[in-house]
Image: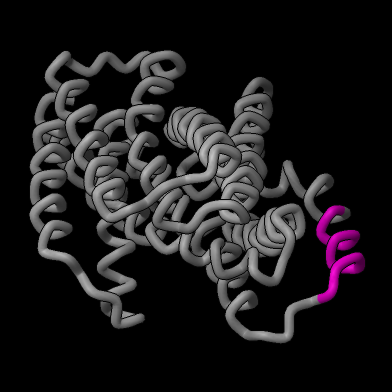
Amino acid sequence: MRGMNDQRKGWWLGLAGMLIFSGSLPATRVAVQGFSPLCLTAVRASAAAALAALALLAWDRRRPRGREWLHLLAVAGGVVVGFPLLSAMALRHITAADALVLVALLPLCTASFAVLRAGERPRRAFWIYSALGAALVCAFALSQGARAAWLGDALMVAAVVVCGYGYAEGARLSRRLGGWQVICWALLLALPLTLPLAGAELARQALPHASAPWIGLAYVSVFSMLVGFVFWYRGLALGGIAAVGQLQLLQPFVGLLLAAALLGETVAPGMLVTAVAVAGCVAAARRHG
């Protein structure tokens, strides 16, 4: 019974993390209109690291030991530096909608690394429903006219791969350190790189006068880089990396619904139909994960 309760809790925590991450690519798209990709990556990581240091000091958690530092280095490379930098570079060439087409591949990528790095063994039906969900998301996005330039496409694929790896490594480590501690230590581990880069980039480039890039920067610094991972890593650790990772199939649709609610954009009937079908794939993947 406890295992079932932990799995259910993991799914709810994963859902909260997915909802927070849904605003990441649109916010990044806005932020790169005023900041270079390297500047945005360094500043968001440095700002989040300051909050992470305060959290670790306030709760006085134990330090990682031995090989845990190597796993944290992998997390930092994947989700603190790799995905933010590569996705920001991609969003200089493609739109957020284009990028969301490729984000649909992230659950499959995360599940693959869960098999390679965490020893999980989802059943065949899980892979079928996971692939079907990814195909539905890609088909819907392409039907809306999303087309990526080859360079932006390649950068976003690379971002998805390193992100999936960072998710799997972080989830493994969360079982020993705790979800929020993993991202906090990863941010601090990257700080000797990100802080000097942030200072150099801010001094080099002209700062934007418009408020929108600053709002985008604030969102990705606080929510995308820190708060979302508190829920996400704990959810992956409790509910299973491969299974809970399927929730990200819903991320493109949540992003579009947020755009409709906040920006007045039109929600096509086809989007709702596809979202229901994808939700069914997620539920089936959970049952067979």
Which residue sits at x=32%, y=53%? 145
Residue 98 lies in the magenta stretch: no
Which residue sits at x=16%, y=22%? 128
Which residue sits at x=44%, y=34%? 171
Query: Secondary structure of the magenta portion, mostly?
Result: helix
Q: How many numbered marks are there? A: 0
The spot of residue 281 in percent (x, y) is 13, 37
- Please indicate whether residue 210 sits to the left or right of residue 256 in the image: right
Residues 129 and 52: in front is: 129
Quadrant in which the N terminus is drawn: top left
- Please indicate whether residue 147 sits to the left or right of residue 239 in the image: right
- Please indicate whether residue 226 sits to the left or right of residue 22 in the image: right
Residues 63 and 45: in front is: 45
Residue 199 lies in the magenta stretch: yes
The spot of residue 199 in percent (x, y) is 87, 62
The spot of residue 24 in percent (x, y) is 47, 59
- The residue segment tinted magenta is 197-206
Would you place residue 25 above or below residue 118 in this image?
below
Q: What is the basis of the colouring in this image?
A: one colour
Which residue sits at x=36%, y=45%? 101
Q: Quadrant of residue 241?
A: top left
The spot of residue 196 in percent (x, y) is 88, 54
- Please indicate whether residue 5 sits to the left or right of residue 29 in the image: left
Residue 185 in view, yes or no: no
Residue 23 in view, yes or no: yes
Quadrant in which the C terminus is drawn: top left
